[in-house]
Image: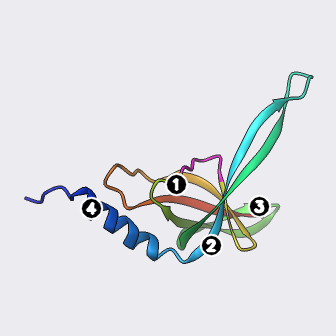
Amino acid sequence: MSSMPTAAQLASARAAQQATMTTVCTVRTPGSPTPDGTGGASPGTPTDTATVCRVAPTGGQEAEIAAKLQAIGAYTIALPYGTVVDERYTIIIGSETYQVVAVLEHGNLATACRVIATRVG
């Protein structure tokens, strides 16, 4: 039977996990929509937050896009524990932009925030 980690042990594990995140990235939060006066809305100004991450290919598939067979890759991106992110967010790593498609379940014992994302553009 294993016991629950102490707060100090959990903080140490989170710090060790974050130490492996050596890639600088930007988490882009979409801005709140602004009414355009015609019943629609214009996208609001996004907010960028600089942080660190670790990215790894997860898998991929092929799809027909514009009458061409193209590879669509999935990536797991690990962000520091406590990073706020959801499926509306994008993550920018260097010149590449990734769209978050799923946030992996994480509870109060997690050591990182992990998402599945696809490269866009």
Query: Residue at image x 33%, y 49%?
Result: 108
**In this view, the mark in front (2 or 4):** 4
Mark 4 or mark 1, earlier in chain: 4
Is 21 displayed left or right of 27 in the figure?
Answer: left
Q: Secondary structure at mark 4?
A: helix
| Vertical relation: 20 (above or below) 1 | below
Q: Is residue 110 left or right of residue 97?
A: left
Amino acid type of the residue that numbered disc 4 sits on in the rendered structure: Ala
Q: Nearer the viewer, mark 1 or mark 3?
A: 1
**With respect to residue 57, does 115 lie above or below?**
above
Residue identified by numbered label 1: 83
Give the CA distance from mark 1 to mark 3. Answer: 33 Å
- Count of residue discs: 4
Where are the magenta residues, as a range?
A: 84-89
- Measured as percent of width and height from the top left, residue 95 is found at 75, 73
Q: Which residue is mark 4?
A: 8
- Whole-percent x and y of residue 21? 50, 74
Q: CA distance from mark 1 to mark 2?
A: 14 Å
Question: Cβ–Cβ below 8 Å for labels 4 and 3?
Answer: no
Q: Earlier in the sequence, mark 1 or mark 2?
A: 2
Q: CA gap, disc 4 to disc 3?
A: 50 Å
- Judging depth in this view, the residue of 120 and 3 nearest the camera is 3
Image point 62% across, 72% down: which residue?
24
The quadrant where residue 67 appears: bottom right
Q: Which residue is mark 2?
A: 24
Colour setting: rainbow
